Image: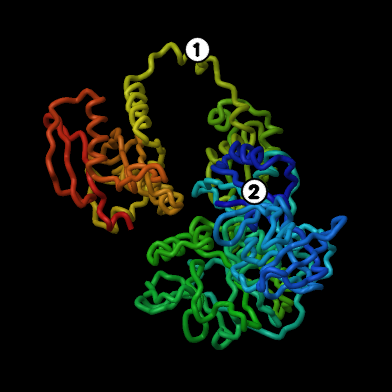
Amino acid sequence: MTISYNWLKDYTDIPETPDELGQLLTSTGLEVEHVNAFETVKGGLKGLVIGEVLTCTKHPNADKLSLTTVDVGGDKALSIVCGAANVAAGQKVVVATVGTTVHPTKGESFQIKSAKIRGEQSEGMICAEDEIGLGESHAGILVLNTTTKNGTPASEYFKIESDYTLEIGLTPNRVDAASHIGVARDIKASKGRSLNWPSVDKFKKDDSALTIDVTVENKEACPRYSGVTLTNITVTESPAWLKNRLTAIGLTPINNIVDITNYVLHETGQPLHAFDADQIAGKKVIVKTLPAGTKFTTLDNKERELTNNDLMICSENDGMCIAGVFGGAKSGITESTKNVFLESAYFSADYIRKTSMHHGLKTDASFRFERGTDPNGTIYALKRAALLMQEIAGAKISSDIIDIYPDKVENKTILVRDKNINRLIGKVIPREKVFAILEALDISVTNKKDDSYTVSVPPYRVDVIQEADISEEILRIYGLNNIELSDFAGSDFIAEFPEKDINKFRNTLSQMLVANGFYEIWTNSLTNAAYQQKHNLTFTGEPVEILNKLSEEQGILRQTMLFTGLEVCAHNINRRQKDLKLFEFGKIYFKTNGKYIEEERLALYVSGNIETENWQNKTRATTYYDLAQHVTQVVQKSGISNIRQEVVKHQLYDYALQLSAGNKIIGLIGKVKPALLK
């Protein structure tokens, strides 16, 4: 998940640098994997200024060049040779002064130098939009309609924002932190700071020009459905501040209405959906499932066949949206949209998860719904988005808020005993400190007794369901570094025991593999049962299922190292890192005859070229035989002799070589089947 440093500062005080903030968040359990500098335009338009063309005459030695003098706010005007046909005196233009590095939309960056062009001195460059990364057009120089003072930095004129992004490796249980306000909540709790929610107090109905009737037929799948209508909308490009916010976290701005729904989603964690109200047949919205086999075309213009478990948002006549997952092609926002029905709902995580998995649709909305959103946050997000549409799109709020919420989701109540908290944490933390931490996390404390108390947990904390979870919340805010090791577990005591041979053996193999260009990876032992089910795969023993699984993606313990390793490969390949040599020490798990079995494994993965190609070195594709050579080195290093090799058929590989020593299978080398790679 990507978080914008500048955006985060809208909700709480952050004196920390981006790197310091990353360390703070990691200490609270939100592991920051990367902190990256970000600019909405490459180079940030540094060195570029707004100027005015004072004079423009033909170049004496070139028909297609002009001699100009340009005022850039300095003591004297600059002489600049310009090749654009549309340059003329009196224009406001963007000027790259001498020494500026220019970053074009396409091609390599270059530095502006003072030079003679066909015998005439040129002290800069008047820029086209594609020459400075602002667009694709090279039809002529960029002419501005402005009275901006000459010499004004172009970054200021175009509102270019420099930012930092924090990549958070969000665990599936922490969906409450899947937003900027969610992350700010943890900063608030950790540092005792205030949390600033944008005000929605100005929300009020302007008129009653448009009424949409809403019916929820499947209340199990949709426990809460809220909506409001807006009229008189102008769909256009979003303002720079909104585009900058979305671009920083990797989203592409579309139009002001869609951008607002995306903005509020990443601000609050509550997904929204905007329908073109004029496309809602009968002015009725019905939340229900449709018969299995019903065809529905989504926004990506793909026709999909629905199951009878797919929750749909329907008009009087047909489906408009796969609830919580993906919009329909007919009811989406276009440039001609004038009226909008805005949806803010709480959908069942189980329904959304099954639909998302079945159709292979992963969206920002489904990511949150299938993990559990805040059932009591729909109205705030609705008001927030409606007010932004008033401000940015000229909208009028043309109905009361519709809110169908028959069974309110109440806070969870958990009895907490001091002795259990102290035992789990390993330290007696003063009660006053414990209560302060819990209150800072919006977990209220009641019914305080000598040895116990009761806590009330808000519904958006789907991960806090039992006493052990409360201890974890206390510990992550109190700080693991503040828990001292007991004398018994101190380093002197631990050093008395020799390191296990298995660890020495691993280190030896790791050093050898790293010396051969491999990188070590660590993956989760939990994996997705659908990987096995989809391809009808069977493994030794029965799979070990997780009783209280947080998501289907992590529903069972792995019976093979392959799938979690392939996820890492896919992650790298999708980021243009195709030349991979990876290894992992781990365990597989299964159940047989009622007993739970764990077995150690070493997995090696190779893909792409044998080494990165450059101008000095040509390379070739990695082959099955390259991997076999590395496996042979591992076997030799292990001291195993008399290895028998046998070509075998295998459910995971197109072709495979099985390695045995005596009657024991010790390894398998194979080329993964393409069907599994998909």
Q: In the orientation shown, which residue stands out farthest toward the right?
A: 75
Q: Amino acid at mark 2?
A: Tyr
> Which label belongs to residue 245?
none
Q: Residue at x 59, y 22 (%)?
A: 484
Residue to which mark 1 is pinned: 492
Image x and y of residue 526, in percent: 39, 44
Residue to which mark 2 is pinned: 164
Quarter of the figure with residue 384: bottom right
Left or right, residue 583 beside residue 169: left
Image x and y of residue 556, in percent: 35, 47
Q: In the orientation shown, which residue stands out farthest toward the bottom?
A: 282
Q: Label 1 vs label 2: CA separation?
A: 42 Å
Q: Amino acid at mark 1?
A: Asp
Q: Residue at x 29, y 45 (%)?
A: 622
Left or right, residue 105 beside residue 10: left
Disc 1, SS: helix
Q: Nearer the viewer, mark 1 or mark 2?
A: 2
Observer-nearest of 283 and 580: 580
Observer-nearest of 624 and 647: 624
Observer-nearest of 486 and 577: 577
The residue carrying pointer 2 sits among few (fewer than 14), some (14 to 19) or many (20 or more) residues within 10 Å by Cα, namely: many
Inspect this view and state whether residue 274 appears: yes
Q: Give the mark nearest the N terminus, 1 or 2.
A: 2
Q: Residue at x 49, y 67 (%)?
A: 325
